[in-house]
Amino acid sequence: MDGELRLLVTEDGADAERVDLLTGHLRRDLDQLDVDDVRPLAGGAAPPGTRAFDVAVVGGLIVSLGTSAQALGSVLAAVRSWLSRSPGPVRTVRLELDGDVLELSQASASEQKRLIELFASRHVDRTTERA
């Protein structure tokens, strides 16, 4: 499975600094997995007059899955676990892979599991067809 999974973290009522903090916590969890890379999602060129080369999307991450068949499942499980440790304001993680989108938020644990399994199965099937 070679691909890039895009993630976007949001929290009801959170400002950009809070979302950036939350994204950093999730990134640390994802960095522990067997994936090729986890990096900020670039949002384009920096505004005129700044020295940065590109601007990161607040709350955005890109996970390069590499060739491990288990990478996508591991990332999805980590996101689900991260969300379950988050009492308080509603947090949402939007995941996108090959134009397919999964948004996880306030669904029950069993509903999240079912949605994750469905999302993962669609992408495992696609990589099997390409082989």
Image (cartoon, helix red, strand yellow):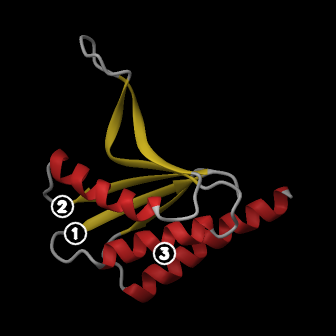
Indicate which disc residue 12 carries: 2
The amino acid at mark 2 is Asp
The mark nearer the N terminus, 2 or 1, is 2
- Please, which residue is most extreme toward the front here? 32
Labels 3, 2: front one: 3
Looking at the picture, how far across and down is residue 59, in whole percent?
31, 49
Q: Are marks 3 and 2 in contact (CB under 8 Å)?
A: no
Q: Are marks 2 and 1 in contact (CB under 8 Å)?
A: yes
Taking depth in this image into account, of 115 and 46 the one nearest to the observer is 46
Residue 52 versus residue 9 in the image, above or below: above
Q: Residue at x 24, y 49 (%)?
A: 20
Tally the marks: 3
Dot 3 corresponds to which residue?
77
For the N terminus, the quadrant is: bottom right
Q: Residue at x 15, y 74 (%)?
A: 88
Looking at the picture, how far across and down is residue 91, in whole percent?
26, 66
Corner quadrant of residue 73: bottom right
The amino acid at mark 3 is Ala
Looking at the picture, how far across and down is residue 107, in whole percent?
35, 79
The mark nearer the N terminus, 3 or 1, is 3
Dot 1 corresponds to which residue?
90
Looking at the picture, how far across and down is residue 5, in whole percent?
54, 53
Q: Residues within 10 Å of mark 3 (few under 14, many from 20)?
A: some
Secondary-structure class at tag 1:
loop
Indicate which disc residue 61 carries: none
For the C terminus, the quadrant is: bottom right
Q: Residue at x 35, y 36 (%)?
A: 56
Residue 111 versus residue 89 in the image, above or below: below
Taking depth in this image into account, of 66 and 107 the one nearest to the observer is 66
